[in-house]
Image (cartoon, helix red, strand yellow):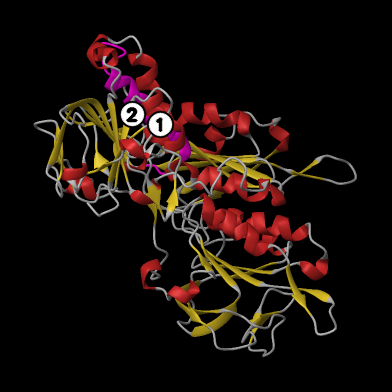
Amino acid sequence: FSSSFFLLNLGTQIHAEGKSLPFNKANRVTLNAPEETPEVDWKHYEYVIVGSGTAAQAALEVIRASDSNGNSLSLQQKRDEAYVLIVTENDRLPRPDIDEETILGHELRGVYDRWRRHITSHLNTMVDSRSDVVVVSDFSDVSLDVENKTITFMNSGTKVSYSKCLLAPPGRARSFYVLGSNAMEYSLNDHINNLYDANDFKILEASFAPLEEANNDATVTQRRKNFAVVGGGFLGTEVVAALSEINQKLPEEQRNNLTHIFFEPNALAEYFPPYLSTHITKKLGLQDVKTLSNSLVTGVKRSTSETSQYQFDIHNNFSNCPGGPVNDVRVQATLMRGDDRSKLDMNFDYIVLASTHIKPEVDLVQRSSLEIDATNGGIAVNGSLEAFDSVFVAGDAASFYSKSLGRRRVEVYDHAINSGLICGRNMSGQQKAPAIYNHLPAFVCSLPSLGITFECVGEINSKLKTVGVWLAKRDEETGKPVQGKTDFDRGLIYYLKDSAVVGVVCCNASECVEAARDIISQKNLIKDAAADQLRKKILLAPESWIYIKETHPFSSQEG
């Protein structure tokens, strides 16, 4: 462990990034300074929880509720000792300068809740006044012995035994494309945002606010800023939509220039059929979002230019026109165009690297005998989310088997909550037989500025065959459905693999999510005339109001 590795009971003072947290310094324990260590019983804990994210929090709440009258804890409870050991990392410790509940406006708050909240530390709520929890920070040098049910802290040699262990380390946002945050210039830290945690969203919101500049005549003017959001997945597209919504509320002269950069042909093209991703990209363009598709950001560096080398015209095209609308640009992004492999440099005041996907934290497991799923990543577990005797895994670290979809790993809030709950039940022995994790996690992609909310269940992959069941467009004069046309404002998309429905997207149809889960779980074969069979699976409207749109595997159509 590093020198900042502490064991703390409730009431312990720790230091995170130079800031003191409100704990009692008298109970501090530093593992790699044994001569300063007060007497603490390290022999045994009923529960060891590795991680402090949403999955770990959910499991702990179940354990506390079920063990309040448990016989197995009677001795420790009579002695008023902690019976849960939480192992986390230094940068997951509570920060007094961040209040998750109040830091963000509603535009970005929802984005954070959907895509980053589940990997944010919740130690403030996990460590409560009952003093039933001990916390150790920084597990970079921890050895897990699953056969002997022990955890050894290698630097100090301290060994802890457990009855049940939960591995729920929250993952980290993946580095974007060929960009690695560790390799970027330090001077760019204030101009590049990876959206790792709540504080990053807070910084983005503050950075997007109008910039005031003082003139020589003592007057103040507002300056537009150039913002780029890199990433065409769910997180990147939601961030672009949220910033666009903020922009629309500002006076026109204060609105920032917003560019969306991604390697795919359209926003969300990896997940949605071509016609729908094209539709979304066009709607974002109507909100003054400039698009650079088929573009891979290969590098960023501090710009020495005072003007933008490229600017956009009203048709969303870019040209080699010097003297863009914003001066004093800070960051230069190098892009490689996917169509002709040409390169271009663009200057921005601020760049957001919005990677949707989470890299599971499995370093601790690699020092044990547990199996890592080479295909999906994460720790392989059985149906009860158990990786080995009394060792459970929850959250995005778990590679679990789904009866409907096979082995998979999921990185969303719904899965973090429900897998944590199941692990808590199984660890605390609420029932004789272990509970099986049969839940099909869902996630939401909300684009309120476009009037669209997608609720997704199962495998959402645009390379699969899809059948879209949409409400037909209405004639403005008669109000009657127009056959062969739709506004894509309400509908369902079924994703098929091996003649079975493996995923469903509900567009502005939240009432259909549970029915969508049932259809995936049933695994009914749909071999012929898929559209005819699926158009009535979930009734959206009368038959005459329905418009069907099909795509086939690897389809490139955009109509």
Q: Distance between the residues labelled 2 and 1?
A: 6 Å
Give the extent of the magenta segment.
410-435
Question: Residue farthest to the left?
Answer: 148
Type of the residue with mark 2: Val
Residue depicted at x 67% and y 89%: 321
Looking at the picture, tell me which residue is in the foreground, 238 or 534. Answer: 238
Q: Which mark is residue 454?
A: none
Res 398 quadrant in image: top left
Dot 1 lies on which element? Answer: loop
Say left or right for 63 vs 554: left
Vertical arrangement, residue 181 with respect to residue 538, above or below:
below
Q: Determine whether label 2 and label 1 are within 8 Å by CB.
A: yes
Looking at the picture, tell me which residue is in the foreground, 158 or 242. Answer: 158
Tell whether position 406 is magenta: no
Q: Is the magenta stretch mostly helix, strand or loop?
A: helix
User: Can you identify the residue that label 1 sits on?
Assistant: 127
Instruction: Point out residue 444 in the picture as x, y percentages from the top left corner.
Output: 55, 41
Say left or right for 156 vs 425: left
Instruction: Point out residue 311 in the picture as x, y percentages from the top left corner.
Output: 67, 81
User: Can you identify the residue that label 2 sits on?
Assistant: 133
